[in-house]
Image (cartoon, rainbow, N blue to C red):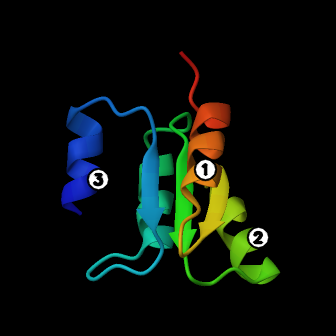
């Protein structure tokens, strides 16, 4: 919830969204963010990398889904693809 409040107040180039978080999970947080910001790239980070998990993330408005443990090169490649200057 604090993250969503910060999103409304500050500018970010992208969001790295953990799917499993206390209080509000990443899927729910993405749904809330998309209500007021359709453009910011949101990248799901999750140990769940089954096709249905990836499809659910993308359907809810995330731009990419990376599995844990995170491959740093893949993270940078994904960020470089999604962030526009």
Residue 49: % across, % down: 69, 80
- State which mark lies toward you, 2 or 3: 2
Q: Is residue 35 visible?
A: no
Please indicate whether residue 60 sits to the left or right of residue 18 in the image: right
Location of residue 8 in the rendering, given as x and y in whole percent from the top left corner = 27, 39
Q: Dot 1 corresponds to which residue? A: 73
Of residue 71 and residue 15, the one placed in the foreground of this image is: 71
Rendered location of residue 13, percent (x, y)? 43, 32
The residue wearing badge 3 is 4
SS of the residue under disc 1: helix
The Cα–Cα distance between marks 2 and 3, rounded to whole angstroms, is: 23 Å
Residue 26, horizontal then vertical, whole percent: 44, 69
Q: Quadrant of residue 84?
A: top right
Q: Are marks 3 and 1 in contact (CB under 8 Å)?
A: no
Sequence-earlier tag: 3 or 1: 3
Image-based side of 3 in relation to 17, left or right: left
| Front of the two marks 3 and 1 | 1
Which is closer to the viewer, label 1 or label 2? 1
Residue found 44% across the figure and 55% down from its top? 16
Numbered tag placed on residue 55 in the rendering: 2
Label 3 neighbourhood size at 10 Å, few (<14), some (14-19), many (20+)? few
Q: Disc 2 on helix, strand or loop?
A: helix
What is the quadrant of the N terminus in the image? bottom left
Res 68 seen here: yes
Mark 2 and mark 1 in contact (Cβ < 8 Å)? no
Secondary structure found at label 3: helix
């Amino acid at each position: 919830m604090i993250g969503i409040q910060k999103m409304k107040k500050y500018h970010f180039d992208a969001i790295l969204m953990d799917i499993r978080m206390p209080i509000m999970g990443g899927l729910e947080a993405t749904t809330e963010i998309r209500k007021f910001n359709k453009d910011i790239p949101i990248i799901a980070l999750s140990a769940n990398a089954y096709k249905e998990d990836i499809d659910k993330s993308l359907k809810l408005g995330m731009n990419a889904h990376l599995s844990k443990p995170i491959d740093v090169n893949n993270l940078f490649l994904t960020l470089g693809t999604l962030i526009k200057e």
